[in-house]
Amino acid sequence: MFELLKTDSHSKARLGRLTTSRGVVDTPVFMPVGTQGSVKALDPRELREMDTQIILGNTYHLSIRPGVEVIQQAGGLHQFINWPHPILTDSGGFQVFSLAKIRKIKAHGVEFRSHLDGSLLFLGPKEAMEIQRALGSDIAMVFDDCPSHTGGPREKRAAVERTIRWAKECREQPRAPGQQVFGIVQGGCNAALREECARAIVAMDFDGYAIGGVSVGEPESEIFKAVEFTEPFLPSNQPRYAMGLGTPAQLVELVARGVDMFDCVLPTRVARNGTAFTAKGTVSVKAGFNKADFRPIEEGCECFACRHFTRAYLRHLLNVNEILGLRMVSVHNSHMYLKLMVDIRAHLAAGTFATFRREFVAGYVPSRRVLSARAGTEEIER
Amino acid sequence: MFELLKTDSHSKARLGRLTTSRGVVDTPVFMPVGTQGSVKALDPRELREMDTQIILGNTYHLSIRPGVEVIQQAGGLHQFINWPHPILTDSGGFQVFSLAKIRKIKAHGVEFRSHLDGSLLFLGPKEAMEIQRALGSDIAMVFDDCPSHTGGPREKRAAVERTIRWAKECREQPRAPGQQVFGIVQGGCNAALREECARAIVAMDFDGYAIGGVSVGEPESEIFKAVEFTEPFLPSNQPRYAMGLGTPAQLVELVARGVDMFDCVLPTRVARNGTAFTAKGTVSVKAGFNKADFRPIEEGCECFACRHFTRAYLRHLLNVNEILGLRMVSVHNSHMYLKLMVDIRAHLAAGTFATFRREFVAGYVPSRRVLSARAGTEEIER
């Protein structure tokens, strides 16, 4: 189901093609995040206009609201949200460990109280797979234990052992027709743990492999290390997915480390604060210096927002709290991420990825504020 | 510039065509409200897809933020907001009298404190026309005195006298190239005052005439009376505009009373509370009874929302505060108003308006909650 078309000669970057039950996904790919069944502020037409191939949904959130029964009655998640293209669903593991207030880890899952109304819920490998089967996603993720990056070695080892045990339980569950299941490798920034976890998970023979626990507030150097410690143990003929990452420059660097799939809330989250991504870094559209700047957010950009509106107008809209303002910055940012992947794929095909990588990363000025926005856990979004 | 194509044989309803410097407007027409330079939650493409011919902008709001200078630098309001089609700008009179906290009425305008930051501002006939000239709207409104409907006879008479005096001052101001100016008739629900005001305003020879002071919290019967007291004194060969109205059934009734143009915040305002307009009245999309209702908001409706999404999905989006929910109800409601005017024009052309009017009004169940939403002054919108 995954075809490795080409490997870069200067890095571990890969050009690939992932076939799902609802269509082909060209990799490397960025997957916009539709936690609650909607990529925040965007509609499906806008998503398709920016070449979105696959989006994310979330097991934890969707099972709480609107509930699995409603989505089943609709004919599955694709029908419910009117997105006939591929969907990957996260298992809810991350949310149980980051959002739920009180939790008790048990042998076969986690007992926790809903972040919404405090009601007592239980989510484990069996439940997560059952929900994802009902949602009918094209790619389901196993239910893992995703510890905080500040946890000690004992906690990390326990999480790895639990993740392996739960992955096995997930592997044995029935699936929706045509549904692929991806395993998740945990182990923090510890080389031995990552290797151990990767070997165990790969032995179970999943359809793809995710590197988990890499967007939990740790510094960038540890993100890269966690990926480098894991990647050598993943089969080259299957897709690799780095969960919850990252900034545009990080995506380029992670592609160079052999990652094929990405998801991240940054493009839409920072848009709602009036911040735009460009190839040179982030810029505050809302800032006063844009008051009479009649250029588009990013010159040369072909997104709907840049083709139709100026910085001055978008700044005004954000300033007076008009919804169109955050809508258009969300359009621009999501387009920016998706276009970056288009460019990466083109450079991989042309054999010019090394130069592109060097120039892009050198030209991209990272923002501390944006990095902390990614790690923000106050919002109901991965 | 206004062509009266046909008058209904059973009512005062009129089919017309208004030519502005940026295109022709078929009347009766509904004009979506873009107070701050954006029809709330909608983009220009969505507006054009629902056959929007002309939108509103507001002098008071736009002159405070972003300020006239910025819009002038952009090349005018059309350029600033990327709407190359007709725009009508309200003069700010209504806002000065309804929003500004502290005001002092002077001979040539009103001194008031901004509702935003309390800064001292002055708006009068000269200033309002100067701002509208700078905005470059296709139709400018005169600066009037719009008293509350609870005011006594002395207050109403003073407002009429001031409105007449200020209209004269407005009439003498220079205009943007091709800009039309509409007079406004005040006088509350008093027949003598309406006649006096209408005769004086019409004598000044404006390009069209508005009936003002009809959306200020008064009961429906008084709205109709105010229009009936005014209409006989307006020239039949010029357009009539009832400001700030109303519900769909009210629009049909006002068309029957000889009104050609309408604007109202209701479609987008109630959408943000999860309420949809249909031909049968309003319905709460957000309500629990829609949880597993997989029909569109209104069966047979051809708006983007009804073509793509179910009540169950939109209810979920509204329930979890996803922006797409209020976006789509805003699309449906605005489309509903615009389609109603398309139907009215078709029935006027076919000579079947009387039957349509009777059946529509009989089938439309008004909502007390919606009527009070129209009169709401807490929001920054006319």
Image (cartoon, coloured by chain):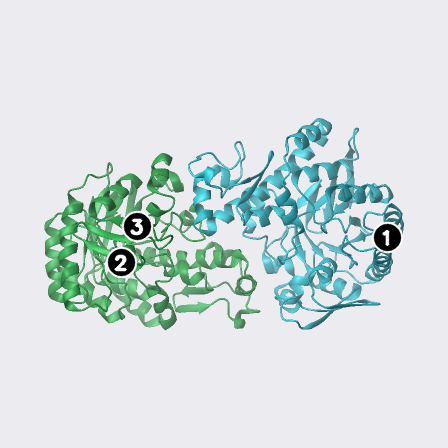
Chain colours: A cyan, B green
Q: Which residue was labeled with disc 2? A: B97
Q: CA distance from mark 1 to mark 3?
A: 69 Å
Question: Dot 2 surroundings within 10 Å: few (below 14), some, or many (20 or more)?
Answer: some
The picture quadrant where one finds residue B191 is bottom left
Residue A50 seen from this side: no
For disc 3, the neighbor class at 10 Å (few under 14, some 14 to 19, many from 20) is few
Residue at x-position 37% and y-position 66%: B373
Along the line of sight, the residue nearer the viewer: B159 or A120: B159
Residue at label 3? B120
C-beta proximity under 8 Å, tags 1 and 3: no
Image location (x, y in percent) of residue B102: 29, 58
Q: Chain of mark 3?
A: B
Residue A9 location, x and y as percent?
Answer: 79, 29
Q: Residue at x 41, y 64 (%)?
A: B277
Image mark 1: chain? A
* Circle 1 or circle 3, nearest the eye: 3
What amino acid type is highlighted by mark number 2? Phe
Q: Is residue B84 left or right of residue B232?
A: right
